[in-house]
Image (spheres, helix red, strand yellow):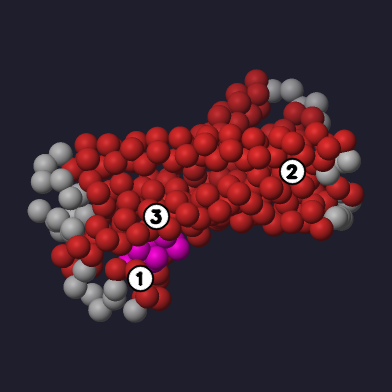
Amino acid sequence: MFLKLLKQDFRATARLMMPVYAAAILLALFNRLSLALQNGRVESHFLYVFTQLASVLFVLTMAAIVVMSFVLMIWRFHKNYMTDEGYLMFTLPVNTTELILSKLTIAIGWFICSALVAWVASLIVSHNSDMLDIFTINDVSSFQTPEGRKLLAGGAIFLLLSGICGCLMFYAAMSVGQSFRSHKTFGTVLAFFAFYIVMQILSMVLLSGTLSSMAGTMEAMMESGTMLSIANGLLWRYIAFEAVFAATYYAITHWMLSKKLNLQ
């Protein structure tokens, strides 16, 4: 049943995301063609206007990809679980965990796809093969060391976990907001900012505490050329921090949907 939920969510969101991705690639090709003509000394007022228009549309499409990824994440969760559709969704033979994870999986999947499409479109426009270097570390001596590879792996994990944590924070805020008898939207916004402020405060406390604990050894580490060790220390602490908050937001969402669901 979980796979059926994923399939249903994918089909519903793909109808909106795929046209935007196609538009981004097409506009990237148009931009590349117009730039090639300009570099070929083709002088034309129409070509100039076309190039400027294509560039503006390309930037707007890139922004639309980001915005739609987030809007879909919020809208699908709210539409399926916080409206009248919730009466149907919560009678399906699936548990609350599967309902949450289905939305989370699709949302993260579209985030990754959006990032890849944006990168490919930018690569087409720039026509710069050096952009491929972001996928290799063989020519960067600093990252050939175990510490360097650990930093790269940690960076990838941090980005993924940050996306998961962000999604779950929105889900938790909507779950808390729907428990209000009236002004559910206000309750959602209030819960979101409360979560965000608490997270930022604790993040600053973590950063301050980490830097204080490392103050005695940081100067020696910098002199010995082990900056990657410092970066790894900070990064993996923040990964643990994001993981704790992601688990907290998940627990809040699960509890609210299981025990405090209010669809009226």
Q: Where is residue 113 in the image (x, y as percent from the top left)?
A: 55, 55
Determine crowd level at label 1: few under 14, some 14-19, many 20+ residues with C-alpha closer than 10 A: some
Name which of mark 1 and mark 2 comes first in the sequence: 1
Residue behind mark 3: 248
Task: Please report the bounds of the magenta region as a residue range.
Answer: 99-107
Task: Name the mark on residue 98.
Answer: 1
Above or below residue 62? Residue 239 is below
- Is 144 magenta? The answer is no
Give amino acid for label 1. Answer: Glu
Secondary structure mostly seen in magenta is: helix
| Location of mark 2 (residue) | 230
Q: Name the outermost residue toward the top.
A: 45
Tell me the distance, in whole angstroms, between the alpha carbons under discs 1 and 2.
Answer: 39 Å
Q: Nearer the viewer, mark 1 or mark 2?
A: 2
Characterize the local packing of mark 3: few (<14), some (14-19) or many (20 or more) Cα atoms within 10 angstroms: some
Q: Identify residue type, mark 2.
A: Ile
